[in-house]
Image (cartoon, rainbow, N blue to C red):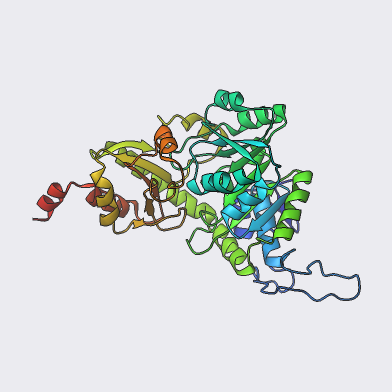
Amino acid sequence: MKGMIIIGNVTKKNIETKVVHGDKGYDPHTGAISFPIYQSATFRHPGLNQSTGYDYSRLQNPTREELENTIASLENGKRGFAFSSGMAAISTVLKLFSPGNHVIVSDDMYGGTYRLFEEIYKGYGLNFSYVDTSVVEDVQGAIKENTVALFIESPTNPLMKVSDIKALSSLSKDRGLLTIVDNTFLTPYYLRPLELGADIVVHSGTKYLGGHNDTLAGLVITSEEGLIDQIQLIQKSEGAVLAPFDCWLILRGIKTLSVRLNKQQENAIIIANWLRKHEAVETVYYAGLPDHAGYEISKKQASGFGAMISFTVRDVKLVAQVLEKVKIILFAESLGGVESLITYPIIQTHSAIPEEMRRKIGVTDKLLRLSVGIESVDDLIMDLDQALKNESDYKEVNE
Protein backbone atom coordinates (compact mmCIF):
# COMPACT_ATOMS: atom_id res chain seq x y z
CA MET A 1 0.00 0.00 0.00
CA LYS A 2 1.20 3.51 -0.82
CA GLY A 3 2.86 5.26 2.10
CA MET A 4 3.61 2.11 4.06
CA ILE A 5 6.98 0.42 4.47
CA ILE A 6 7.08 -3.34 4.95
CA ILE A 7 9.92 -5.21 6.65
CA GLY A 8 9.26 -8.94 6.76
CA ASN A 9 5.66 -9.30 7.84
CA VAL A 10 5.58 -6.01 9.76
CA THR A 11 4.01 -2.93 8.18
CA LYS A 12 5.23 0.45 9.40
CA LYS A 13 2.00 2.38 9.28
CA ASN A 14 2.30 5.14 11.88
CA ILE A 15 4.51 8.09 11.12
CA GLU A 16 6.19 7.94 14.54
CA THR A 17 7.58 4.56 13.49
CA LYS A 18 8.31 5.57 9.91
CA VAL A 19 10.50 8.52 10.88
CA VAL A 20 12.65 6.30 13.10
CA HIS A 21 13.16 3.43 10.65
CA GLY A 22 13.22 5.23 7.32
CA ASP A 23 12.93 3.24 4.09
CA LYS A 24 15.12 0.16 4.41
CA GLY A 25 15.57 0.65 8.14
CA TYR A 26 19.16 -0.61 8.08
CA ASP A 27 21.90 -1.47 5.60
CA PRO A 28 20.80 -4.77 3.97
CA HIS A 29 24.41 -5.69 3.16
CA THR A 30 25.93 -5.38 6.64
CA GLY A 31 22.98 -4.98 8.99
CA ALA A 32 24.26 -1.54 10.10
CA ILE A 33 21.46 0.19 11.99
CA SER A 34 22.79 3.62 11.03
CA PHE A 35 22.51 3.61 7.26
CA PRO A 36 26.08 3.98 5.91
CA ILE A 37 27.58 7.00 4.21
CA TYR A 38 28.52 5.70 0.78
CA GLN A 39 31.24 8.26 0.18
CA SER A 40 31.96 7.25 -3.37
CA ALA A 41 31.66 9.24 -6.57
CA THR A 42 31.68 6.17 -8.82
CA PHE A 43 30.87 2.46 -8.65
CA ARG A 44 32.47 -0.61 -10.23
CA HIS A 45 30.59 -2.40 -13.02
CA PRO A 46 30.55 -6.22 -12.70
CA GLY A 47 30.96 -6.51 -16.48
CA LEU A 48 30.00 -5.06 -19.84
CA ASN A 49 26.41 -3.82 -19.84
CA GLN A 50 26.13 -4.79 -16.17
CA SER A 51 25.45 -2.52 -13.19
CA THR A 52 24.94 -2.84 -9.46
CA GLY A 53 22.22 -0.22 -9.83
CA TYR A 54 24.70 2.51 -8.96
CA ASP A 55 27.04 3.98 -11.54
CA TYR A 56 27.89 7.56 -10.62
CA SER A 57 26.75 9.50 -7.55
CA ARG A 58 25.30 12.37 -9.54
CA LEU A 59 22.85 9.82 -10.94
CA GLN A 60 22.26 7.95 -7.69
CA ASN A 61 24.00 7.04 -4.46
CA PRO A 62 22.79 4.48 -1.89
CA THR A 63 22.74 7.00 0.98
CA ARG A 64 20.83 9.56 -1.08
CA GLU A 65 18.47 6.86 -2.28
CA GLU A 66 17.66 5.94 1.32
CA LEU A 67 16.84 9.57 2.12
CA GLU A 68 14.80 10.04 -1.04
CA ASN A 69 12.77 6.89 -0.42
CA THR A 70 12.31 7.83 3.23
CA ILE A 71 10.91 11.30 2.49
CA ALA A 72 8.67 9.86 -0.24
CA SER A 73 7.25 7.41 2.28
CA LEU A 74 6.72 10.07 4.93
CA GLU A 75 4.87 12.32 2.46
CA ASN A 76 2.98 9.33 1.04
CA GLY A 77 4.42 10.06 -2.39
CA LYS A 78 5.94 7.76 -5.00
CA ARG A 79 9.31 9.45 -5.45
CA GLY A 80 11.55 11.82 -3.55
CA PHE A 81 14.55 13.81 -4.74
CA ALA A 82 17.31 15.27 -2.56
CA PHE A 83 19.11 18.50 -3.50
CA SER A 84 21.96 20.58 -2.16
CA SER A 85 19.62 23.20 -0.66
CA GLY A 86 15.98 24.15 -0.43
CA MET A 87 16.50 26.79 -3.09
CA ALA A 88 18.05 24.20 -5.44
CA ALA A 89 14.92 22.09 -4.92
CA ILE A 90 12.57 24.97 -5.77
CA SER A 91 14.75 25.96 -8.73
CA THR A 92 14.39 22.43 -10.11
CA VAL A 93 10.60 22.61 -9.83
CA LEU A 94 10.54 25.92 -11.72
CA LYS A 95 12.39 24.27 -14.61
CA LEU A 96 9.24 22.27 -15.27
CA PHE A 97 7.79 25.46 -16.79
CA SER A 98 8.44 27.37 -20.01
CA PRO A 99 8.88 31.04 -20.97
CA GLY A 100 5.54 32.82 -20.92
CA ASN A 101 4.10 30.59 -18.18
CA HIS A 102 2.43 32.25 -15.19
CA VAL A 103 2.63 31.04 -11.57
CA ILE A 104 0.45 32.22 -8.68
CA VAL A 105 2.42 32.48 -5.43
CA SER A 106 1.58 33.08 -1.75
CA ASP A 107 2.11 36.81 -1.20
CA ASP A 108 3.54 36.27 2.28
CA MET A 109 6.56 34.12 1.54
CA TYR A 110 10.23 33.58 2.26
CA GLY A 111 12.30 36.38 0.76
CA GLY A 112 14.80 33.98 -0.79
CA THR A 113 12.03 32.34 -2.79
CA TYR A 114 10.82 35.75 -3.95
CA ARG A 115 14.36 36.66 -5.00
CA LEU A 116 14.69 33.41 -6.95
CA PHE A 117 11.41 34.04 -8.74
CA GLU A 118 11.89 37.74 -9.50
CA GLU A 119 15.63 38.11 -10.01
CA ILE A 120 16.39 34.79 -11.69
CA TYR A 121 13.39 33.09 -13.28
CA LYS A 122 11.62 36.23 -14.40
CA GLY A 123 14.64 36.70 -16.65
CA TYR A 124 13.87 33.31 -18.21
CA GLY A 125 10.36 34.43 -19.12
CA LEU A 126 8.30 33.14 -16.20
CA ASN A 127 5.68 35.47 -14.71
CA PHE A 128 4.54 35.55 -11.10
CA SER A 129 1.52 36.99 -9.27
CA TYR A 130 1.57 37.29 -5.48
CA VAL A 131 -1.80 36.56 -3.92
CA ASP A 132 -3.19 35.88 -0.46
CA THR A 133 -3.58 32.12 -0.95
CA SER A 134 -5.52 31.82 2.31
CA VAL A 135 -8.42 33.34 0.33
CA VAL A 136 -9.52 30.85 -2.35
CA GLU A 137 -11.51 33.48 -4.22
CA ASP A 138 -8.41 35.67 -4.59
CA VAL A 139 -6.51 32.76 -6.09
CA GLN A 140 -9.35 32.00 -8.46
CA GLY A 141 -9.42 35.61 -9.58
CA ALA A 142 -5.69 35.61 -10.29
CA ILE A 143 -5.79 32.69 -12.76
CA LYS A 144 -4.93 33.67 -16.33
CA GLU A 145 -4.89 31.80 -19.62
CA ASN A 146 -1.14 31.19 -19.23
CA THR A 147 -1.28 30.17 -15.57
CA VAL A 148 0.35 26.77 -15.07
CA ALA A 149 0.83 26.41 -11.32
CA LEU A 150 0.05 27.54 -7.81
CA PHE A 151 2.96 27.79 -5.34
CA ILE A 152 1.81 27.78 -1.71
CA GLU A 153 3.53 28.27 1.62
CA SER A 154 1.35 27.10 4.49
CA PRO A 155 1.77 28.40 7.11
CA THR A 156 3.39 31.32 5.33
CA ASN A 157 6.68 32.88 6.30
CA PRO A 158 6.56 35.01 8.42
CA LEU A 159 2.89 35.89 9.06
CA MET A 160 1.68 32.30 9.41
CA LYS A 161 -1.28 32.49 7.02
CA VAL A 162 -2.89 29.10 6.45
CA SER A 163 -4.15 28.04 3.03
CA ASP A 164 -6.85 25.45 2.41
CA ILE A 165 -4.71 23.02 0.42
CA LYS A 166 -7.55 20.67 -0.46
CA ALA A 167 -9.71 23.48 -1.84
CA LEU A 168 -6.83 25.04 -3.76
CA SER A 169 -5.73 21.68 -5.17
CA SER A 170 -9.28 21.01 -6.35
CA LEU A 171 -9.40 24.44 -7.99
CA SER A 172 -6.03 23.80 -9.65
CA LYS A 173 -7.10 20.42 -11.00
CA ASP A 174 -10.28 21.92 -12.45
CA ARG A 175 -8.13 24.47 -14.29
CA GLY A 176 -5.35 22.07 -15.28
CA LEU A 177 -2.75 23.66 -12.97
CA LEU A 178 -0.10 22.12 -10.75
CA THR A 179 -0.28 22.69 -7.01
CA ILE A 180 3.12 23.01 -5.32
CA VAL A 181 3.31 23.23 -1.52
CA ASP A 182 6.31 24.28 0.53
CA ASN A 183 5.87 22.06 3.59
CA THR A 184 9.01 23.19 5.44
CA PHE A 185 7.23 24.61 8.51
CA LEU A 186 5.00 21.61 9.33
CA THR A 187 6.91 18.69 7.73
CA PRO A 188 5.15 15.41 6.87
CA TYR A 189 4.86 14.71 10.59
CA TYR A 190 2.07 17.31 10.84
CA LEU A 191 0.96 17.85 7.22
CA ARG A 192 1.01 15.77 4.04
CA PRO A 193 -0.12 17.96 1.12
CA LEU A 194 -0.12 15.12 -1.46
CA GLU A 195 -2.94 13.49 0.51
CA LEU A 196 -4.90 16.73 0.10
CA GLY A 197 -4.49 16.78 -3.69
CA ALA A 198 -1.23 18.69 -4.16
CA ASP A 199 1.03 17.57 -7.02
CA ILE A 200 4.46 18.49 -5.64
CA VAL A 201 5.82 19.06 -2.16
CA VAL A 202 9.09 20.89 -1.48
CA HIS A 203 11.14 21.19 1.70
CA SER A 204 14.10 23.04 2.97
CA GLY A 205 15.50 19.96 4.70
CA THR A 206 17.92 22.32 6.43
CA LYS A 207 15.15 23.19 8.86
CA TYR A 208 13.01 20.71 10.81
CA LEU A 209 13.95 17.57 8.90
CA GLY A 210 17.64 18.05 9.71
CA GLY A 211 16.74 19.64 13.02
CA HIS A 212 20.23 20.56 14.24
CA ASN A 213 21.29 23.59 12.19
CA ASP A 214 24.24 21.64 10.80
CA THR A 215 23.56 21.02 7.11
CA LEU A 216 21.84 22.40 4.02
CA ALA A 217 19.37 20.24 2.08
CA GLY A 218 16.36 20.48 -0.21
CA LEU A 219 13.74 17.87 -1.05
CA VAL A 220 11.05 17.42 -3.71
CA ILE A 221 8.32 14.77 -3.57
CA THR A 222 5.63 13.83 -6.07
CA SER A 223 3.43 10.91 -7.12
CA GLU A 224 2.90 11.94 -10.74
CA GLU A 225 4.86 9.68 -13.12
CA GLY A 226 5.33 12.41 -15.72
CA LEU A 227 6.68 14.80 -13.10
CA ILE A 228 8.95 12.09 -11.69
CA ASP A 229 10.58 11.61 -15.09
CA GLN A 230 11.06 15.34 -15.65
CA ILE A 231 12.47 16.05 -12.18
CA GLN A 232 14.80 13.06 -12.41
CA LEU A 233 16.14 14.33 -15.74
CA ILE A 234 16.79 17.80 -14.32
CA GLN A 235 18.39 16.41 -11.17
CA LYS A 236 20.86 14.13 -12.93
CA SER A 237 21.60 16.62 -15.70
CA GLU A 238 22.22 19.69 -13.53
CA GLY A 239 23.72 17.77 -10.62
CA ALA A 240 22.60 19.92 -7.67
CA VAL A 241 22.36 16.72 -5.65
CA LEU A 242 22.80 16.29 -1.92
CA ALA A 243 26.13 14.77 -0.93
CA PRO A 244 26.18 11.39 0.90
CA PHE A 245 27.32 12.80 4.24
CA ASP A 246 24.61 15.48 4.19
CA CYS A 247 22.03 12.83 3.26
CA TRP A 248 23.13 10.88 6.32
CA LEU A 249 22.77 13.96 8.54
CA ILE A 250 19.20 14.51 7.30
CA LEU A 251 18.38 10.82 7.80
CA ARG A 252 19.73 11.04 11.34
CA GLY A 253 17.69 14.18 11.98
CA ILE A 254 14.48 12.61 10.69
CA LYS A 255 14.77 9.82 13.27
CA THR A 256 13.94 12.29 16.05
CA LEU A 257 11.49 14.43 14.06
CA SER A 258 8.41 13.40 16.02
CA VAL A 259 9.84 13.93 19.50
CA ARG A 260 11.47 17.22 18.51
CA LEU A 261 8.35 18.66 16.90
CA ASN A 262 6.11 17.54 19.74
CA LYS A 263 8.33 19.35 22.25
CA GLN A 264 8.77 22.41 20.04
CA GLN A 265 5.04 22.73 19.48
CA GLU A 266 4.33 22.25 23.18
CA ASN A 267 6.72 25.11 23.93
CA ALA A 268 5.36 27.27 21.12
CA ILE A 269 1.75 27.12 22.30
CA ILE A 270 2.78 28.20 25.81
CA ILE A 271 5.03 30.99 24.51
CA ALA A 272 2.43 32.28 22.03
CA ASN A 273 -0.16 32.60 24.78
CA TRP A 274 2.38 34.28 27.08
CA LEU A 275 3.37 36.77 24.39
CA ARG A 276 -0.28 37.71 23.82
CA LYS A 277 -0.50 38.94 27.40
CA HIS A 278 2.79 40.83 27.45
CA GLU A 279 2.38 44.60 27.59
CA ALA A 280 5.27 45.16 25.16
CA VAL A 281 3.76 42.91 22.48
CA GLU A 282 1.22 44.18 20.00
CA THR A 283 0.21 41.17 17.85
CA VAL A 284 1.08 37.47 17.88
CA TYR A 285 0.94 35.32 14.74
CA TYR A 286 0.69 31.62 15.53
CA ALA A 287 -1.62 29.14 13.81
CA GLY A 288 -2.25 27.29 17.08
CA LEU A 289 -4.10 30.21 18.67
CA PRO A 290 -7.88 29.65 18.50
CA ASP A 291 -8.50 33.19 17.23
CA HIS A 292 -6.01 32.80 14.36
CA ALA A 293 -7.80 33.08 11.00
CA GLY A 294 -6.39 29.73 9.87
CA TYR A 295 -6.97 27.81 13.09
CA GLU A 296 -9.94 25.74 11.91
CA ILE A 297 -8.37 24.96 8.53
CA SER A 298 -5.19 23.88 10.33
CA LYS A 299 -7.17 21.51 12.53
CA LYS A 300 -8.91 20.08 9.46
CA GLN A 301 -5.87 19.46 7.25
CA ALA A 302 -2.95 19.04 9.67
CA SER A 303 -2.28 17.15 12.88
CA GLY A 304 -0.31 20.00 14.44
CA PHE A 305 0.38 23.73 14.29
CA GLY A 306 4.16 23.70 14.32
CA ALA A 307 6.56 25.83 16.31
CA MET A 308 6.95 29.06 14.34
CA ILE A 309 5.74 32.29 15.94
CA SER A 310 5.93 35.86 14.69
CA PHE A 311 5.05 38.87 16.82
CA THR A 312 5.15 42.64 16.66
CA VAL A 313 6.36 44.83 19.50
CA ARG A 314 4.57 48.05 20.39
CA ASP A 315 7.69 50.19 20.20
CA VAL A 316 10.15 49.73 17.32
CA LYS A 317 12.98 50.63 19.72
CA LEU A 318 12.39 47.29 21.43
CA VAL A 319 13.54 45.38 18.34
CA ALA A 320 17.25 46.14 18.72
CA GLN A 321 16.97 45.71 22.47
CA VAL A 322 15.41 42.25 22.20
CA LEU A 323 17.93 41.05 19.62
CA GLU A 324 20.85 42.24 21.77
CA LYS A 325 19.53 41.04 25.13
CA VAL A 326 18.32 37.51 24.41
CA LYS A 327 20.77 35.00 25.84
CA ILE A 328 19.26 31.52 25.51
CA ILE A 329 17.40 32.38 22.32
CA LEU A 330 19.94 33.04 19.57
CA PHE A 331 19.74 35.95 17.13
CA ALA A 332 20.35 34.08 13.89
CA GLU A 333 18.80 33.28 10.54
CA SER A 334 17.15 29.95 9.70
CA LEU A 335 14.70 27.95 11.79
CA GLY A 336 13.60 24.48 12.82
CA GLY A 337 16.62 23.40 14.85
CA VAL A 338 16.65 22.26 18.47
CA GLU A 339 17.95 25.69 19.49
CA SER A 340 15.48 28.58 19.66
CA LEU A 341 16.31 31.28 17.10
CA ILE A 342 14.95 34.80 16.68
CA THR A 343 15.10 36.71 13.40
CA TYR A 344 14.27 40.22 12.18
CA PRO A 345 12.56 39.55 8.82
CA ILE A 346 12.68 43.08 7.42
CA ILE A 347 16.49 43.05 7.21
CA GLN A 348 17.18 39.32 7.11
CA THR A 349 14.85 36.72 5.62
CA HIS A 350 12.68 39.24 3.74
CA SER A 351 15.15 41.94 2.73
CA ALA A 352 14.78 40.94 -0.94
CA ILE A 353 11.07 41.78 -0.93
CA PRO A 354 10.27 45.39 -1.95
CA GLU A 355 9.25 47.70 0.89
CA GLU A 356 5.82 48.39 -0.62
CA MET A 357 5.04 44.67 -0.79
CA ARG A 358 6.35 44.09 2.75
CA ARG A 359 4.20 46.91 4.09
CA LYS A 360 1.13 45.59 2.26
CA ILE A 361 1.37 42.10 3.76
CA GLY A 362 2.40 43.31 7.23
CA VAL A 363 6.14 42.62 7.40
CA THR A 364 6.95 45.80 9.30
CA ASP A 365 9.92 47.16 11.23
CA LYS A 366 8.26 45.96 14.46
CA LEU A 367 7.97 42.28 13.42
CA LEU A 368 10.14 39.55 14.91
CA ARG A 369 10.07 35.84 14.01
CA LEU A 370 10.73 33.16 16.62
CA SER A 371 11.64 29.54 15.87
CA VAL A 372 10.92 27.74 19.12
CA GLY A 373 13.37 25.03 20.16
CA ILE A 374 13.33 22.19 22.66
CA GLU A 375 14.75 24.05 25.66
CA SER A 376 12.86 24.48 28.93
CA VAL A 377 9.87 26.66 28.16
CA ASP A 378 10.32 28.42 31.51
CA ASP A 379 13.85 29.42 30.55
CA LEU A 380 12.69 30.65 27.14
CA ILE A 381 9.93 32.79 28.66
CA MET A 382 12.32 34.19 31.25
CA ASP A 383 14.74 35.08 28.45
CA LEU A 384 12.04 36.80 26.40
CA ASP A 385 10.72 38.62 29.44
CA GLN A 386 14.06 40.15 30.38
CA ALA A 387 14.71 41.08 26.75
CA LEU A 388 11.32 42.80 26.40
CA LYS A 389 11.55 44.86 29.57
CA ASN A 390 11.90 48.60 29.10
CA GLU A 391 15.38 49.81 30.00
CA SER A 392 14.01 51.74 33.00
CA ASP A 393 12.14 48.69 34.26
CA TYR A 394 15.19 46.52 33.71
CA LYS A 395 17.37 48.88 35.76
CA GLU A 396 14.84 48.93 38.59
CA VAL A 397 14.78 45.13 38.72
CA ASN A 398 18.57 44.96 38.95
CA GLU A 399 19.08 47.80 41.47
Q: In this view, does 366 lie to the left or right of 353?
A: left
Q: Where is residue 300 in the image (x, y as percent from the top left)?
A: 55, 32
Instruction: Using the image as rendered, state which of residue 170 and residue 103 is in the foreground.
Output: 103
Q: Where is residue 112 in the image (x, y as percent from the top left)?
A: 51, 49
- Residue that sits furthest to the left in the current view: 399
State the residue at coordinates (70%, 56%): 69
State the residue at coordinates (51%, 31%): 132
Q: Position of residue 127 (x, y in %)?
A: 62, 37
State the residue at coordinates (57%, 42%): 191
Observer able to see residue 1: no
Picture quadrant of residue 147: top right
Observer able to see residue 62: yes
User: In the picture shown, does residue 22 fall above or below 281?
Assistant: below
User: In the picture shown, does residue 11 fall above or below 52?
Assistant: above
State the residue at coordinates (62%, 28%): 167
User: In the picture shown, does residue 156 fall above or below 88?
Assistant: above
Q: Is residue 387 left or right of residue 54?
A: left
